[in-house]
Amino acid sequence: MTRPLADLHVAVLMGGLSAEREVSLSSGKGCADALEGQVAKVSRVDAGRDLAAVLTDLKPDVVLNCLHGAWGEDGCVQGILETLQIPYSHSGVLASALTMDKDKSKSVLRAAGVEVPGGGLYDRREVARRHVIAPPYVIKPNAEGSSVGVFLVPEGANGPQAEVGAPDWAYGEQVMVEPYIRGKELAVAVIGEPSGPRALTVTDITPVKGFYDYEAKYAPGGSVHKLPADLPSAVFEAALRQSEIAHTALGCRGVSRADFRYDDLNDVLVLLEVNTQPGMTPTSLVPEQAAHVGMGYKDLVRWMVEDASCPR
């Protein structure tokens, strides 16, 4: 944005229609609170299917998109903002849609030289009937985030995860099944600067119990974050570089976050997925990493607004 921040009317989109609604409400509240006093006006918008009409009436100068998951993070809302020609934060239509599709984004990352897990897409009912790959493996929706609908099938399991075949399953007819990669859970935040994407640092995440699921990500005390991660220097640098490569290959803008597994026994670093609109909640990784490199929460939110543009 070229106008002074203090003159701007910013609409903060939050809530939305996805399974990540509650996380988005928390992210949106934090960002809206941070903008109070920094901009001329903040409008808090619980985004619904009337979003285009709401924004047409509000006439904001900028939209800060704090939606997570389907519809808000997959290119749909980005298309609305492009149509209305309102400058907005984070990634554009193509990058959002591509990155939200785990199968297609893995193909792009693999072509860019990034190590990604094996496995593939399977009909959810087949996955519920039999082991489509040898345990241990992970089942996840192809187009959800925040570990919604994710199951770990351990080695020696008698059968697959029956919930995936249930009539009320709400996460698509095909699911991603990937080999489980033992080791450390890592995350890297990336900021898209004019000179190129800049990875901030590497966080080592240890869930208090189980694996890094929805509760471990967002419940207070659900996981322990160590940053910078205690890793061999070559692995640390590889995680930073692979995150920057992924950000560029997928066409991301603004802030993104890459999630990795590092098998320290076999020295294998694998990028699981990239998030184009990572959480901004009190337990979220991106603001924590930004603070580590000297960018406070308010500074980060201000930067996202200043980085907004259209087209994206």
Image: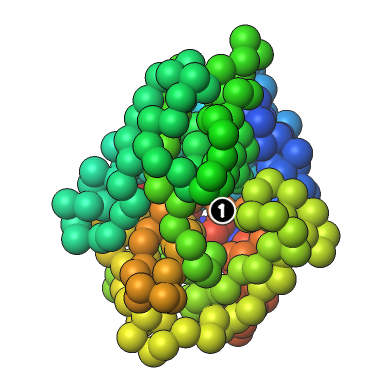
The residue lying at 41 percent from left, 88 percent from top is: 232
The residue lying at 50 percent from left, 37 percent from top is: 139
Whether residue 99 appears in this view of the structure is yes
Along the viewing direction, whichever of 294 and 11 lies nearer the viewer: 294
Left or right of residue 72: residue 312: left
Percent x, y for residue 240? 38, 75
Considering the image in quadrants, where does the C terminus appear?
top left
Q: Is residue 295 above or below residue 67?
A: below
Along the viewing direction, whichever of 125 and 78 lies nearer the viewer: 125
Left or right of residue 1: residue 268: left
Q: Residue under label 1, please give it.
A: 278
The residue lying at 74 percent from left, 49 percent from top is: 215
**The residue positioned farthest toward the top in the image shown:** 167
Along the viewing direction, whichever of 255 and 233 lies nearer the viewer: 233
- Please state the total of marks drawn on the protein image: 1
Image quadrant in which you'd find residue 102 = top left
Which amino acid, by three-letter code, is at mark 1?
Pro
Percent x, y for residue 159? 55, 30
Whether residue 193 appears in this view of the structure is no
| Element carrying mark 1 | loop
Percent x, y for residue 267? 35, 76
Image quadrant in which you'd find residue 148 = top right
**The residue positioned farthest toward the right in the image shown:** 220
The residue lying at 43 percent from left, 76 percent from top is: 264
Percent x, y for residue 144? 53, 35
Q: Residues within 10 Å of mark 1 (few under 14, many from 20)?
A: many
Q: Is residue 307 above or below residue 124?
A: below
